[in-house]
Image (cartoon, rainbow, N blue to C red):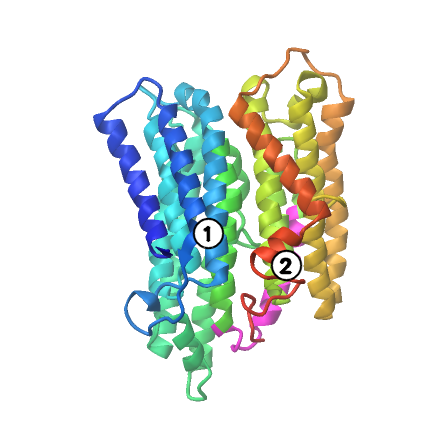
Amino acid sequence: MIPVANLEVAVIFLGISLLLFELFAPTRDKRILAFAAIISLTVILAATFFLQPVSAQSDSGFWSFYTADPLSIFFKRFTLVTTIIVLIMMIDYAPVVRTFTPGPPPLGEFFALPIFTCAGLMYLVSAVDFIMIFVALELVSVSFYVLVSFTKKNPATLEAGVKYLILSAVATAFLVYGIAWIFGVTGETNLDRITAALARADTDRTAATFGALLIMVALGFKIAAVPFQIWVPDVYQGAPTPVTAFLSVGSKAAGFVVLLRVLRPFLILPHMERLIILIAILTLIYGNLAALPQNNLKRLLAYSSIGHAGYLLIGVACFAGTAIVFYLFAYLLMTLLGFAVLIIVARHTGEGISDFDGLAKRSPLLAFAMLISMVSLAGLPFTAGFFGKFFIFAAAISQHQIGLVAVGVITVACGFYYYLKVVRAMYWQTPANNDPISTDILSRLMIGALIVAIVWLGIYPQPILRAMDLKGPNLSAISVSAR
């Protein structure tokens, strides 16, 4: 059996090995490093099914910072799968990196940085102490700073990198200041001990609420919730497309796991639940309405990711752990499929919706893949996205949050409009040219696997539910258990 804590060590060792290999054993085709990373991460993913269970955790030492509960193990696998798919996308994106980087293209670093991001995300989903949350979050953020601005000769990328750097630094400052206030009130940084301290009658609730609000600002930036979403459209559009996919899926998933853990002690504080409901409503409305007029597909997906954060916040407001887990997994599949197609098409035409005109004639596979991605993101039946929204709304109804359900249903209708714009372009518009678009075998296998998974989970969602012994839209083991 494999100790759980060794997973992150193996991932970090892999990232360092890739950098050293490129430095001391340069190869003509740097894509070999990406293939080596994909194979190694697949082995680590397989090893997660042979983990040594942790029966008890100490109140001191490493286990006071780190947990190995079912939620964290599930999302370690989630992060590894996301990183593997992103690396496959990066292989397709390598020609663009060569074009927009001065001198010899640093593809080794481009393939290694997602490995360190993966390690940070894996630590983040296991963190149960503010100290470890901060360290893991900074490992992720620093990696993304470099990845977002990697193509240095592209002005849009540099602009995106500067915006992400500045706003992420501001969010980090809010997080540190909030942690300082919570530590000043409770004398603790461990989440379980903070919960016990806040339950005492002599605790200063006003100061604790102020600290909690500061921390919520930082996490709101991480999950792109309104009003902390201003960085998303420009950063998503300007960043290299595989990095945008990684930001959209991996970073958002880890942010919601941390949010679930952090909210548990803070729900004792007054008005916290109402604040989450308000943020969920604002996020749903802004994300979906702002996506309506978009003509650039990356920008459309950026605004729609804000809308999906709103649906996930409905699950958070209703304490629906299972619904959140399933929605995040469905979001992983359908979003990465859309970005995988976008990378290939953008190399031949562009990133605008009009650049997808007549794609069905130029590449039936890519058009069908984008069709599945769009209708699943919209929530059409027989796709994973439908069950994701179904579980979220079922949880809201069970908690009598009818207002949230009403807003959610209206914004789903908005989603059908802007997602089906892409489908109309692919199948009903005339292409500017009829040159076929080719894809390599690895990309075809990845796209095919994502299509099968989206349709399969849209018909038979039990495999993901059983992965954590789930049977419905509520899960007491991983959902927030206190109101």
Q: Range of the magenta residues?
A: 265-287
Q: Position of residue 461 (x, y in %)?
A: 67, 51
State the quadrant of the C terminus. Answer: bottom right
Instruction: Name the dominant secondary structure of the magenta segment.
Output: helix
Give neighbour class at mark 1: few <14, some 14-19, many 20+ (Cα, 10 Å). few
Q: For mark 2, what is the residue?
A: 323
**In this orientation, does residue 283 appear?**
no
Per the image, the residue denoted by label 1 is 49
Looking at the picture, how far across and down is residue 35, in whole percent?
Answer: 40, 29
In this orientation, which residue lies closer to the viewer: 341 or 161? 341
Amino acid type at circle 1 is Phe
Horizontal and vertical percent for residue 27?
29, 20
Q: Position of residue 213 (x, y in %)?
A: 48, 67
**Amino acid, disc 2:** Ala
In the rendered image, is residue 295 in sight? Answer: yes
SS under mark 2 = helix
Q: Residue at x 44, y 31 (%)?
A: 157
Viewer-proximal residue among 149 and 372: 372
Q: Residue furthest bottom?
A: 201
Q: Is residue 15 above or below residue 216?
A: above
Q: Earlier in the sequence, mark 2 or mark 1?
A: 1
Residue located 62% across and 47% down the image: 330
In this view, the mark in front (2 or 1) = 1
Q: In this rendering, is residue 385 above or below 159?
A: below
